[in-house]
Image (cartoon, grey):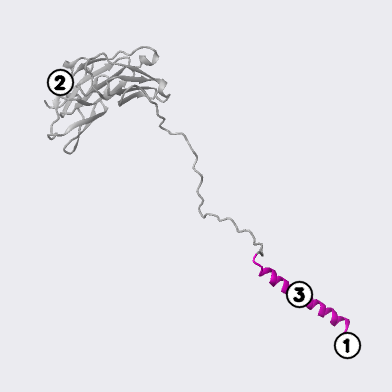
Amino acid sequence: MRTPGARTARRAGLAAAVLAVGAVIWLSHPHAHVPRPPAAAAVHPNPRPQAKARSSPWPIAVIGQGLLTAVACSSPTLCVAGFSNGSVDSSQYPTGGTLGWAESIPAISNLGSLAAIACPSTALCLAVDTQGHLVWSRDPFSSTLGQRAAWSGTRIDPTAALTGIACPTTRLCVAVDRAGHVLTSTNPTGGPGAWALGHAPGLAAGENFTAVSCSGAHFCAAVAGGTGGALLATTHPAMGASS
């Protein structure tokens, strides 16, 4: 004879067996779905910060009507730019966009492409072109005030195209050309006779000057290219080159 406790245990065992069989049948069904815990988001060991968009430190201004070939700035608020057609643009607000620039045309015939510009002060700018001309203005920024800046000019190099000019002061300018010549003047606006032309000593045949720079009245350096490359420097630029 079974006791009540035995009957209760038997019923519990049968119920557990039924539940186990039902679970096996459900899991074997093709549409059965077992919920899974959500996967943890992947974390990069060295996350990179998002780059922030920023404006360019070199904003672009479209100025003039031709190809820009040279520029010089005597201060952050006074710049002069030269073009392949010989015209000159000046600005007292060079970072102000297109409207900040005004054009002037030097009063000289047969003006070539401006190759280089030097502004030793706010009251004097000089430029050289590919036809051997020197052009200058003693009021280069008047055009930015609604007036037309006056630019004069003369030919200082009858032999070759000028390629560079540097004026560390208003009383000293050095220019170079494609024929290996160095031109110097202590009165740069005094006309052709105020310039001394000489061939740079030691410059090999086929090497032509491409640029010149002066840090002051007692040091200038010029570079030449062609068959190779050469750099010439002097601590006595006012003496010129050998003729």
Is residue 67 covered in magenta?
A: no
Q: Nearer the viewer, mark 3 or mark 1?
A: 3
> Which dot marks residue 18?
3
Q: Helix, strand or loop at disc 3?
A: helix
Say whether disc 1 or disc 2 marks the residue closer to the N-terminus: 1
**CA distance separating discs 3 and 1:** 26 Å
Q: Which quadrant would the N terminus be assigned to in this image? A: bottom right
Instruction: Pick the residue in front: 65 or 223.
Output: 65
Image coordinates of residue 148 in percent, x first then y, are 34, 12
Q: Residue tagged by mark 1? A: 1
At 34% across and 24% down in the image, what residue appears? Answer: 73
Q: Helix, strand or loop at disc 1?
A: loop
What amino acid type is highlighted by mark number 1? Met
Say whether disc 3 or disc 1 marks the residue closer to the N-terminus: 1
Is residue 19 shown left or right of residue 86?
A: right
Q: Nearer the viewer, mark 1 or mark 2?
A: 1
Q: Helix, strand or loop at disc 2?
A: loop
Which residues, given as a range, are shown in magenta?
A: 1-30
Instruction: Pick the residue in front: 232 or 207.
Output: 207
User: Residue 24's quadrant in the figure?
Assistant: bottom right
What amino acid type is highlighted by mark number 3? Val
Q: Main secondary structure of the magenta part?
A: helix
